[in-house]
Amino acid sequence: MSSFSFALFFALLSLLFPFISSSNSTTTTIPLSLFNTKNPSQNFYQKLTHLASISLARANYIKKSQDSPVSTTPLYPQSYGGYSITLSFGTPPQKIPFIMDTGSNFVWFPCTTRYLCTNCSVSSATSQSIPTFIPKSSSSARVVGCLNPKCGWIHSNNPKSRCQDCESPTNCKQVCPPYIILYGSGSTGGLALVDTLDLSNKKVPNFLVGCSLFSSKQPAGIAGLGRGLASLPSQLGVKKFSYCLVSHKFDDTGKSSNLVLDFNASGEKTADLSYTPLLKNPVVSEKNALSIYYYVSLRKITVGGKKVKIPYKYLTPDSNGNGGSTVDSGTTFTFMNRGVFEPVLDAFVKQVKGIPRTESIEIITGLRPCFNISRQETVSLPELKFHFKGGAEMTLPMANYFSFAGETDVICLTMVTDSAFGPELSTGPSIILGNFQMQNYLVEFDLKNEKFGFKQQMCK
């Protein structure tokens, strides 16, 4: 980051000085909706192209899982992409929208009246302002001190390394160092706060949350649902959470479903769900970010009932944390390493007969393969199925893996891979299962019993 950016950041910190100072229900339901960042000037080709590129940028960030102060996600400056929830913080409560993200472990919101967001596309309905949290309007907001153990959740857990300005271990007026988060397509920075999270059926005091003072390409905050100590489920002590993602065809319509947080989950399985184990995360020096993802064992992929030949190294993480599969609500289109994607691509190309491939659209969108169906009375495409450890099978409806590109004459496979030019990006997970493939699926993260469950259903 440039010296100008750092100077700007610390100038904005002064905005915080005015407020610096030393239920019985077992479930909470939070409305979940498609995040609206629609840019009306973009045509459908541009939207699809951007979704492909932002999915790839997201995958590159996840796969390059080097240690950083906080792991977070890029957002999507169009109608397709993210799913949002609204949470209330402070006393009295202030409602703030967040992007729900199972691939990060920190919760932060745009903060103060002087919040600065560059290159942030928002819908015409909200272009005048981005909802921000006002700390001085909350009587329960406090800046986190450097010696507070929660400061170690986002920085080094060694107080000596992060609190170098403290006079002594017992006498320290230093605040927790600012966080600056860099990722695939943007950045954010601010100070760590603790404040009251006001849920529908309970109040949670001293919840760690980031007060971001500036961002780039971040029109909303992030609610991290990953495995880290600072994540929403971890701080709340959630035993299980689930959600159902409404179809992307309802983008910008206001249609929503629910994120359900279960604080007292039993060992019983939810009816009709198929389950596969959540795997132990790879433990790799200087790659602590790998510890926050939800790994599952994807054993094989079939196209049209035929097994795709995928080298074993892509299906299981090795000692360096390379390989394996994760589930990530913050990724739109599923990412596959080139060694996985190319055999899947070949399987579709070989089995789709009599429908011409449209390489010009592939170049525009970055998606492959694309087929021109303008002269087809009926279209039959091979079935795509994911097979998981324990026998769980996810048979995707065609709308979850093919999308129209343009009007009605071309369809493209909605999965991405790294560039065909240059070496394969081999670090990190080989397969990142995105939210486009999970449309109209109820998915459950059973943290108590370490299981991932799913079933196809219409999300309401």
Image: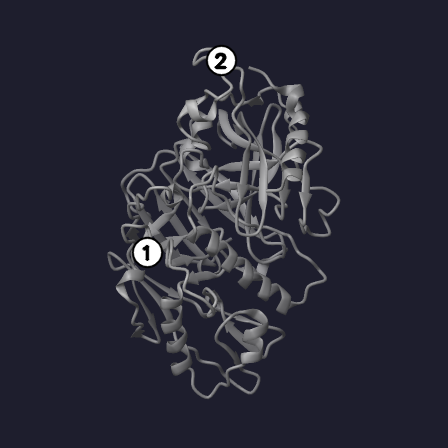
* Left or right of residue 289, residue 247 in this image: right
* Left or right of residue 27, residue 412 in this image: right
Instruction: Decide which of 448, 456 is in the foreground and name it.
Output: 448
* Amino acid type of the residue that numbered disc 2 sits on in the rendered structure: Glu
User: Can residue 328 be seen at all in this image of the molecule?
Assistant: no
Q: Residue at x 29, y 55 (%)?
A: 297
Kindly give the residue lying farthest to the right in the view shown.
Answer: 128
Q: Quadrant of the N terminus?
A: top right
SS at mark 2 in the image: loop
In the rendered image, which residue does mark 2 sit on?
167
Q: How is the image coloured?
A: one colour
* Amino acid type of the residue that numbered disc 1 sits on in the rendered structure: Gly
Q: Residue at x 73, y 47 (%)?
A: 127
In the rendered image, which residue does mark 1 sit on?
324
Instruction: Decide which of 100, 58 is in the foreground and name it.
Output: 58
Q: Position of residue 365 (x, y in %)?
A: 57, 70
Kindly give the residue lying farthest to the top in the view shown.
Answer: 171
Image: 167 above or below 285: above
1 or 2: tag closer to the N-terminus: 2
Q: Position of residue 44 (x, y in %)?
A: 63, 68
Image: 273 above or below 202: below
Instruction: Decide which of 119, 421 is in the foreground and name it.
Output: 421
- Looking at the rendered structure, the number of numbered marks drawn on it comes to 2
Q: Do residues under tags 1 and 2 come within 8 Å of each other at their CB atoms?
A: no
Q: Position of residue 2 (x, y in %)?
A: 62, 42
Q: Nearer the viewer, mark 1 or mark 2?
A: 2
Q: Residues within 10 Å of mark 2 (few under 14, many from 20)?
A: few
Q: Quadrant of residue 98?
A: top right
Q: Position of residue 238 (x, y in %)?
A: 39, 35
Q: Residue at x 41, y 57 (%)?
A: 432
